[in-house]
Amino acid sequence: MKKIKFPSAQTVLLIIAAFVALLTWCIPAGQYDRLAYNKDDNSFVKTSEDESIILEASQKTLDDLEIKIPLEKFTSGAIYKAISIPRTYQKLEARPQGLASFILAPLKGIIQVADIIILVLFIGGLVAIVNYTGAFEAGISRLSILLKGKEYILIIVVTTLIALGGTTFGLAEETIAFYPILIPIFIAAKYDAIVALACIYIGSSIGVMVSIINPFSTIIASNSAGINWTSGIEGRVFLLITGLIICILYIIRYAQKVKKDPSKSIIFDQKESIEKRFSFQNSSETFNFTLQLKLVLAIFILCFVIMVYGISNLDWWFIEMTGVFFVGALLIGFLCRINETVFVDTFIIGANELLSVAFIIGLARGVTILMEDGLISDTLLYYSSSFTNGMNKGLFINSMLFVYSGLSFFIPSSSGMAVLTMPIMSPLADTVSIGREHVVNTYLLGMGLFNFINPTGLILASLAIVKVGYNKWLKFVIPLILILTLVSMIFLTISVYL
């Protein structure tokens, strides 16, 4: 009897899309009114189902709409997306998503995230060019010698640095660039690809989960709740350090077990195929770490340094990041005098290696489009906010944790979740006599916990690079999620009673 194989990431997303389309036939359609600030004429635009009204941009307007947010949060640009208006939810005519919508949703998703897809393809091209020069093999060989017997340092450094990126500027989609580079390094250190995947994805996830100054989650959520983003920062710093230590120890424990006995690897059955794909098989000549190869790696690393600086300080987005990787590939081509035809062919082959990843990102966005077009996200938000009525503060804050985890399946965007839910959820804190910063923390932790396995997030795209099944990732990460959930619940419970 043939063994049943777990479906691919693309199939998983199509199954989820079909499930969401079915939900639009079962869950009532509904929507909150939205309020957006128009800086061009200093006015508010209030949008409901069938009309838009221009309102005066004043604190009185906000008070009349029961939006407890200072006016300057809008005028300063701190809140730049339309927010939900409390007590305006209304049921609308159902918009069930049929077969045509189901078929078109992935295509619309690919179009909407074209900028991310282009970034991923150009990263693949750059990696292929660097690989062609032999710089990776030479660099990894030298690194293996330097870290011999202390390979665990690699786990600590990589996880910590990526977590710092996540907690400061929301390093997430950009981590796609690191997999093709770091996986061979971890394999050379006698670990498996899951260890590399964990250091990058878990590092990013724990950083974003306990974001200290991330403008795309903590700051925009705090602004949308009407509080200063520094409220509750001490608790977040403590939880970030605690969570990061737990994650690093968890990864090291698994990594050391695999190092001692490779058969203990969750992906042992894929060991040969993965190592063949990510280990370098060139001649021993490439192990000579020449000045030229050092310059190639310096250019490659500089691309990431410039990318991080641009995101943090120059308001760059995906198109600018793509430009950096493209220029990096061209510079390496000139430096190594790669033939023009060979350069183009190598670049295209590298981009093709990540094409499946690019499509997965588009398919995940298509699932979100089905929910938006079916008008069910606001309905789920409405019933979720009603669910917590009458609870004591301890039960309230822990219930909110799981509410946000559930909502993050339907609203995977951190900034989108913040502006849609905070004006609705944060006033609930007033009813149980706790600070609104606690709701911001539950939003971060709830979304963050589910993000470790959220199929509408980045995990399936990340797994596709390594060609590891979603079921194997679940087997690896579920115990860690349970530990972090328990720690989060203890933290939230203590914080609301202090």
Image (cartoon, rainbow, N blue to C red):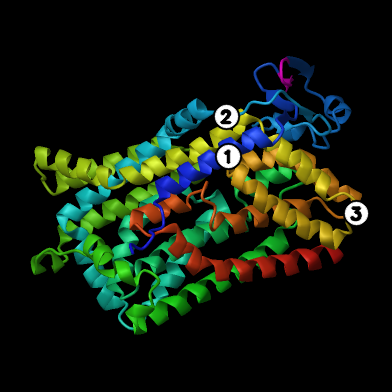
Please tell me whether mark 3 sits on a helix, a strand or a loop: loop
Which range is magenta? 42-51
Residue under pointer 2 = 97
Q: Residue at coordinates 35% horizontally, 84% vertically from top-left?
A: 260
Q: Residue at coordinates 62% horizontally, 68% vertically from top-left?
A: 482
Mark 3: which amino acid? Ser
- Whether residue 50 is in magenta: the answer is yes
Q: Name the image quarter holding the C terminus.
A: bottom right
Find the distance from the CA under tag 1 to the CA under tag 2: 9 Å
Find the distance from the CA under tag 3 to the CA under tag 1: 36 Å
Q: Residues within 10 Å of mark 3 (few under 14, many from 20)?
A: few
Please tell me whether mark 2 sits on a helix, a strand or a loop: loop
Find the distance from the CA under tag 2 to the CA under tag 3: 41 Å
Mark 1: which amino acid? Val
Would residue 239 appear left or right of 318 to someone viewing this image? right
Q: Name the image quarter holding the N terminus.
A: bottom left
Please tell me whether mark 1 sits on a helix, a strand or a loop: helix
Mark 2: which amino acid? Gln
Residue 452, how many percent across, how many down? 54, 58
**Sequence-first tag of 2 and 3:** 2
**Sequence-first tag of 3 and 1:** 1
Question: Between 21 and 84, which is closer to the camera in this rendering?
Answer: 21
- Residue 345 position by quadrant: top left
Residue under pointer 1 = 20
Residue under pointer 3 = 433
Tell me if residue 33 can be seen: yes
